[in-house]
Each structure stands twice: as C-alpha cells, then as structure tokens.
Amino acid sequence: MVRSPVWLLAAAVAIAACRNPPPDASSGSSPHAPAAQPSATAGAREHAAGNRASPAAGGSAQHAPPAGPKAASTARDESADPDDPGDPGGASERSGARTDGAQTRAPVTRGPLFGYRPPRPRAARPVEIILRSTPPGAIAAVDGRVVGPTPAYWRGDADGTPHEFTFVLDGYALARYRFVPRVSGVVHATLEPVADADAGP
C-alpha cells in the first residue's frame, strides 16, 4: 500500500495535537503562559510611570514612604529653635550664661583652733573688808573715796582689780595699803604719831 505525503502530514498533526492539547479557556492556564509575561511586565512599567507622573498631567501623585522614628526625631532637632523655652538645648545655654557670672566662694580653711571657745570669765565674788586702825577713829578711804571713821566696813568684788586703802588721823602719819582683795578679811592700820617721826635720835 502506497501512502501519500498528505496523509502522512495529517497523521503527524493529529499526533502532535494529542500530545499537546489546546489550552482550556475556562481554566485560564496555558502551557504557553510564559510567553504572556512580557506584556504583563510592560503593563506594570506603564502603571509605575503613571504613578510618577505629576498631578497636572493627570497621573496620581507619588507618596513618599513614611519616615521612621529616627528620621522624625532628627527633623525635630534640626527645626528646634535654640531660644525656645521648650527646647532643652536652649535652656542649657541660658542656664550656662547665668552661671558664668556667678562668684565662687573660696574654700574655708579650718585652723587648729577651729571651734575653740575661750572659757567664760567667772562671776566676780563679793568680798567684805573690815577697816580698823590703832588708835581708832582714823578716816578710812578706798580708792580715794571716804568710807568712814574706823572701824569701818567696805564691800567690793574680787575681780582681780587692785584697791588702795588709806587711813588718816590728825597727829599721825598717813597709812596706805595697796593690794588685790581675794577673800573677805580685815585691814588693820597702825598709825605712828607725827611728833615721834619728826624727833631725831
């Protein structure tokens, strides 16, 4: 049996159709799907180009990506006014300006006598002095002030001050005593007659 070339070509086409069935329109899948990728890529490029277009040209405006926390903080720091009271940097500069003119106190040096308190002087103790003389009746005086005829009584303070006691009687030499009274006591003056003092040996 002799086969014609036409029949052989038809048989080859039928075999090829059996091996590669035609794409199903309902499923949407095709063995030649990769061939359609260039058109999809071109459409994506056109869409991106439309997004980059200006609003005046009819395209949608391109939205910048949201800034992160670090970028927002940097923007606030750069735009902050150093003279703004709410700005920490400006406040530190102003506080530094106020403290620059402040006077610093020199350190206080404490010597070996720091905190030493001198003892308080003791209260003066009263003293009583009885003034007597031989013969009696002499005028007694203390520091030039007349106390009275002997026997006399004088009261003072034992404050360490020296006092002068004098006795004067007509016909007798002046008797004088100077000392610091410390305790109560008696001052007894023995008067010498003037006539006996003037008489020679």
Image (cartoon, rainbow, N blue to C red):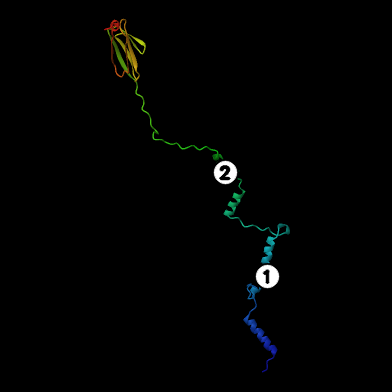
The outermost residue toward the front is: 201
User: Which residue position holds label 2?
Assistant: 93
Please identify the quadrant where the N terminus is shown.
bottom right
Task: Work out whether 200 lies above or below 9.
Answer: above
Task: Work out whether 82 lies above or below 139.
Answer: below
Q: What residue type is labelled 2?
A: Glu
- Circles 2 and 1: CB distance less than 8 Å? no
Residue located 57% across and 54% down the image? 70
In this rendering, would 95 be left or right of 137?
right
* Helix, strand or loop at mark 2: helix
The image quarter in which residue 191 lies: top left
- Name the one closer to the observer, 10 or 177: 177
User: Few, some or many C-alpha atoms within 10 Å of disc 2 (few <14, some 14-19, many ≥20)?
Assistant: few
* Helix, strand or loop at mark 1: helix
Task: Work out whether 177 lies above or below 103.
Answer: above
Percent from the top left, x then y, of residue 71?
Answer: 59, 54
The image quarter in which residue 58 lies: bottom right
Residue located 68% across and 60% down the image? 52
- Name the one closer to the observer, 100 or 18: 100
Percent from the top left, x then y, of residue 108?
Answer: 45, 36
- Name the one closer to the observer, 201 or 107: 201
Q: Distance between the residues labelled 2 and 1?
A: 64 Å
Q: Which amino acid does label 1 sit on?
A: Ser
In this rendering, would 109 be left or right of 181?
right
Please identify the quadrant where the C terminus is shown.
top left
Percent from the top left, x then y, of residue 17?
Answer: 65, 82
Numbered tag placed on residue 39 in the rendering: 1
Q: Earlier in the sequence, mark 2 or mark 1?
A: 1
Task: Work out whether 57 lies above or below 119.
Answer: below
Percent from the top left, x then y, of residue 187?
Answer: 29, 13
